[in-house]
Amino acid sequence: MDVERVDELGQGHLLEEFEGEAREALLEQLAQLDKQYPGGLEAYVDNAQTLLAASKAGDNPYDGYVPAVPLGERLQTATSQFDECEELGMKNVGKTGFVLVAGGLGERLGYNGIKVALPHEIITGKCFLEVYCASILALQERARSLSGDSSLEIPLAIMTSGDTHEKTVELLHKHGNFGMAAGQITLMKQEKVPAIVDNEGHFAQEDDGLVATKPHGHGDVHSLLHSTGTLDDWKERGIEWVVFFQDTNGIVFRALPSAIGVSAMHNFDVNSLTVPRRPGEAVGGICQLDNEETGKSLTINVEYNQLDPLLRATTSPEGDVADETGYSPYPGNINVLIFRCESYHRVLSETGGAIPEFVNPKYADEEKTKFKKPTRLECMMQDYPKLLADDPDAKVGFTQMERSICFSAVKNNPADALGKLKSSGFAESASSGESDVYAVGRLLLAMAGVQIKTADIPSTTFLGLPFPLGAKVVLCPSFGTTVKEIRERFVSPENVKISERSSLVLDGDIFIENLDLDGDLRVIAAPGAKIHIKNLTVRNEGVTFTEVDADDMSVDEIYRIRGYVKEESETMVIQQSEPGETVIDRK
Ligand code: UPG
């Protein structure tokens, strides 16, 4: 970029103290930033000035809108309605593309690596990204046998950022893309935007002269799917549904077949998966916003920091409070979104996928002219329905499910998690994410009729956070992608008994008749192999979790953020690596 252009953009201050190489580097960076932002830096400065003026004036983005609880589908597990949705969803998964947003640094978690590399539980040690890839591959296998098309491939796009890109590439490379084919995964790197120091939109500068930059938010995923040609490609390949999910929700694939089924049933352009939301928790609320004056109505997420002021200003002077159920009446957004590819593609072609932005400066003075620290424009992926506001035919809905089957994120360090647990009932820590994986395993087995305790389970604490001491059950995606499929793996479930202190991993094509487990058991059937457990009694020392000092730097960080490690005294492994069937018949 040349010097005149920098002046035209009102950013001449950046050049004042920098000559020579530093100036060259700065001009090069500005040219790059100009290229990356839709409409260039001129648009960025314009947008910043407009949004900062509105923020200074105290404008409410929801002015004129009154929130109401939207209509949506509420699905309960273990009902025929759930089964029907799953079945319909499974007919559609072969025509689905998955998008993982993984550009966030996870500052609240305080973990030094990328979040998708964290183990989703430490019994298998499989990381989040591995679980996501395995889930997609398991769905792909089912879709292949349903369609008879053995070349069918389900695509995955991952949004990374400067903070996460290299490490994500390394992780995929190290593990051979976790079994996904070459070209099946598309990486899309989001770029940062200039940090801004005042209401005029002047950019902040680092000591070396470069512009200070900050993340632009997960809303970039839409413009990236457009600009990289990924969505064009998916549409051409016949993809009908696009599913977005977050980096650390280890159980989300348990809910996706049925949620895709709901989308297909209602032909929803946008379907948000939601959970009952506790007032005050860091989970946005899906609201139907009605504007009497314009007659417009919009079903959209109102972010957690904006819900309370909106409610106070409109329908509820007490703000973000519970109704008689103990939950907020507004369904909680978990940023698991399912879009209809055809209309999504059309909207992105028309708009480029630029999502309306917002700014959230922390003011240092009453006149609102100074910021405590530089701010920037941001955008959120769940704001996409704003691009549909002028389309009266757009169908925007939600699918509510029990939290235990679809949502448990890992976002907070143990100390903050304790505070969150006290204030909202949800810790969202590494240990709560892990214990929720085991809990959904127990739940699915109990729904299949297995004798396993799912309620009144005693807890211990690690770093002050409660950890239920129930059976540690890990049902890998290869073992079952739907509730029905898992049910069918047990021929006589009443003859399967798992004690509370047990741990169990079921990975692959496995059928179980009679099993009495008190200890640790891992059953692993490689692709093409089958294991039939006719009769098996297991009694061994098993696995225990023991406390570790979170400040002991000799302990790996993945354990320090949990406050425990696993001690494997005695385990039993039944493994079949070659194609063919193994029958286990040991009383
Ligand atoms: N992310 C990016 N790029 C960014 C910022 C975030 O890819 O610039 C990713 C991040 O990696 C994660 C996801 O986006 O996978 C969500 O980010 P996170 O910081 O975890 O979001 P929150 O502020 O916790 O809130 C989001 C939604 C909120 C929802 C909540 C559920 O905004 O409405 O209730 O997630 O976990």
Image (cartoon, rainbow, N blue to C red):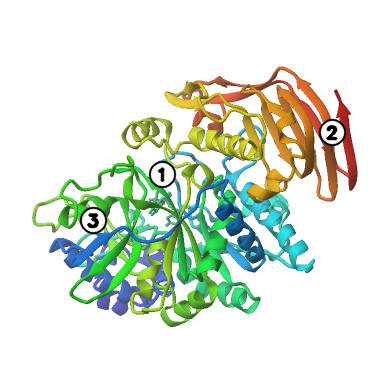
Comes first in the chain, label 1 or label 3: 1
Q: Amino acid at mark 2?
A: Lys
Camera-side mark, 1 or 2: 2
Q: CA distance from mark 1 to mark 2?
A: 48 Å
Comes first in the chain, label 1 or label 2: 1
Residue ID at (64%, 76%): 238
Q: Is mark 3 within 8 Å of ligand 1?
A: no
Residue ID at (17%, 52%): 312
Q: CA distance from mark 2 to mark 3?
A: 63 Å
Q: Which mark, by number, is residue 361?
A: 3
Q: Mark 1 packing: few (<14 Cα in 10 Å), some, or many (20+)?
A: few
Labels 2 and 3 touching (C-beta < 8 A): no
Q: Secondary structure at mark 2?
A: strand
Depth check: give the residue in front, 225 or 91: 91
Q: Quadrant of residue 256?
A: bottom right
Residue ID at (47%, 44%): 403
Q: Amino acid at mark 3?
A: Pro
Q: Amino acid at mark 1?
A: Glu
Q: Mark 3 packing: few (<14 Cα in 10 Å), some, or many (20+)?
A: many
Camera-side mark, 2 or 3: 2
Which image quarter is the C terminus in?
Answer: top right
Q: Label 1, on which residue?
A: 107
Q: Which mark, by number, is residue 301?
A: none
Q: Is residue 204 above or below residue 111?
A: below
Q: Is residue 192 visible?
A: no
Which image quarter is the N terminus in?
Answer: bottom left
Q: CA distance from mark 1 to mark 3?
A: 18 Å
Q: Secondary structure at mark 1?
A: loop
Left or right: 170 as drawn, with respect to 463: right
Q: Label 2, on which residue?
A: 534
Depth check: give the residue in front, 371 or 218: 218
